[in-house]
C-alpha cells in the first residue's frame, strides 16, 4: 500500500465547562484526592493534559454510534467495531485489534497526539495561576435519602489545550476517511470529553483550526455537515 501524503489537523481545544479526565488508580498519589485529573508525568510538570487516547477514543465512539457500528454480539455488546473491513467507516480510520489487521485494510490512518496546555495557559500553570477546581457531586442514597458528596477534580472552564492530529492517506483511499475525523470533531462539540459528561463536565469547542497548515475560518468545525 503506497502512502500518498500525511495530512494534519491542528488547533485548540477550548473548555466551555470543567474537564475531568481521570487519572488511573496506579498514578494517584498517597493522601491525594479521590478523583484527580490526569497530569503530565514528565518530571517537574504535573500539568493537566488530554491524552491522545482519550480524544481518539471519544471521536471513535461518536462515529460508531452515528454509523451503528457497535458490536451487537451479546458477548461483546457495546465493544468497539472490529470488523477490519476497508469499507467500514470506523476501522480504517481508527484501527482494529492486531488479529483483524489485514493487507486490504492497511495501517490505522489516524494518529491523535497528547494535547498539552496552550502556551499562555502553561505559563499560568507554571506560575501557580491555574488551580484545579474541585466539584462536589452529590450522590443521593435512594433508600436512606442521605447525601454522599464526592469530590472530583476538574480543569476549569476557559482553559485551552493545543491538539495535533495526523492522518495518513494511502493510494485509493476515499476522501470520506478524512471527513470522518472532522465529523467526529463536530459531534464532540455537541457531546462531552472525559468523565461526568452527562452532568455537565467536558463541554469543549475546537478553535484556531489549521488543516495541512492552512488556517480555517473561526467556526470551521461547526460548518462540517454531519448528516
Ligand atoms: Zn469496522
Image: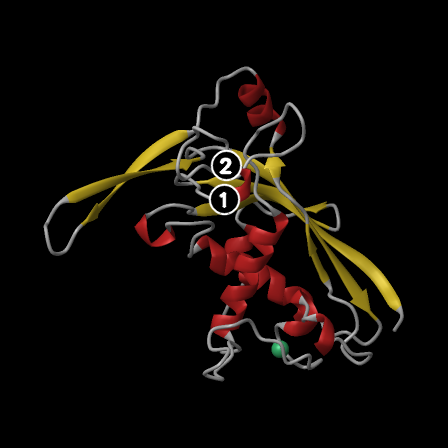
Write the residue at 64% across / 81% down. 83
Q: Is residue 2 left or right of residue 185?
A: right
Q: Is residue 2 left or right of residue 176?
A: right
Q: Nearer the viewer, residue 16 or 98?
A: 98
Is there any visible trace of residue 190 in the rendered image?
yes
User: As drawn, which residue projects farthest toward the front?
Assistant: 30
Crowding at dot 1, Cα within 10 Å, few <14 / some 14-19 / many 20+, comes out as: few
Compared with residue 65, is residue 54 higher up or lower down, i.e. above or below?
above
Q: Is residue 37 left or right of residue 176?
A: left
From the top left corner, tell me how far across and down residue 155 is, in percent: 45, 34
Read off the residue under disc 1: 25
User: As drawn, which residue projects farthest toward the bottom?
Assistant: 73
Write the residue at 48% across / 81% down. 75
| Residue 121 lies in quadrant | top right
Crowding at dot 2, Cα within 10 Å, few <14 / some 14-19 / many 20+, comes out as: some
Compared with residue 87, is residue 92 higher up or lower down, i.e. above or below?
above
Q: Nearer the viewer, residue 215 or 110?
A: 110
Write the residue at 47% across / 50% down. 193
User: As drawn, which residue projects farthest toward the right?
Assistant: 2
Is there any visible trace of residue 223 in the rendered image?
no
The quarter of the picture where the N terminus appears is bottom right
Q: Tag 1's secondary structure?
A: helix
Read off the residue under disc 2: 28
Contact between marks 2 and 1 (CB within 8 A): the answer is yes
Q: Tag 2's secondary structure?
A: loop
Q: Is residue 167 left or right of residue 123?
A: right
From the top left corner, tell me how far across and down residue 186 is, in percent: 51, 58
Amino acid at each position: 500500500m503506497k502512502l500518498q501524503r500525511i495530512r494534519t489537523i491542528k488547533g485548540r481545544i477550548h473548555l466551555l465547562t470543567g474537564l475531568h479526565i481521570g487519572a488511573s488508580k496506579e498514578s494517584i498519589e498517597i493522601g491525594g484526592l479521590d478523583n484527580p485529573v490526569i497530569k503530565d508525568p514528565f518530571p517537574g510538570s504535573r500539568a493537566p493534559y488530554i491524552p491522545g487516547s482519550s480524544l481518539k477514543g471519544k471521536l471513535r465512539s461518536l462515529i460508531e454510534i452515528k454509523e451503528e457500528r457497535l458490536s451487537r454480539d451479546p458477548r461483546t455488546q457495546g465493544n468497539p467495531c472490529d470488523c477490519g473491513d476497508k469499507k467500514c467507516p470506523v476501522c480504517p480510520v481508527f484501527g482494529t485489534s492486531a488479529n483483524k489487521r489485514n493487507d486490504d485494510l492497511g495501517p490505522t490512518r489516524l494518529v491523535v497526539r497528547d494535547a498539552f496546555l496552550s502556551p499562555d495557559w502553561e505559563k499560568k500553570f507554571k506560575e501557580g495561576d491555574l488551580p484545579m477546581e474541585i466539584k462536589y457531586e452529590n450522590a443521593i442514597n435512594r433508600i436512606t435519602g442521605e447525601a454522599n458528596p464526592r469530590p472530583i477534580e476538574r480543569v476549569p472552564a476557559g482553559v485551552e489545550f493545543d491538539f495535533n492530529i495526523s492522518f495518513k492517506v494511502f493510494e485509493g483511499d476515499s476522501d470520506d476517511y478524512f471527513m470522518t475525523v472532522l465529523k467526529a470533531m463536530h459531534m464532540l462539540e455537541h457531546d462531552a470529553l472525559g468523565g461526568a459528561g452527562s452532568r455537565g463536565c467536558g463541554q469543549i469547542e475546537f478553535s484556531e483550526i489549521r488543516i495541512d497548515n492552512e488556517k480555517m475560518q473561526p467556526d470551521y468545525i461547526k460548518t462540517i455537515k454531519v448528516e
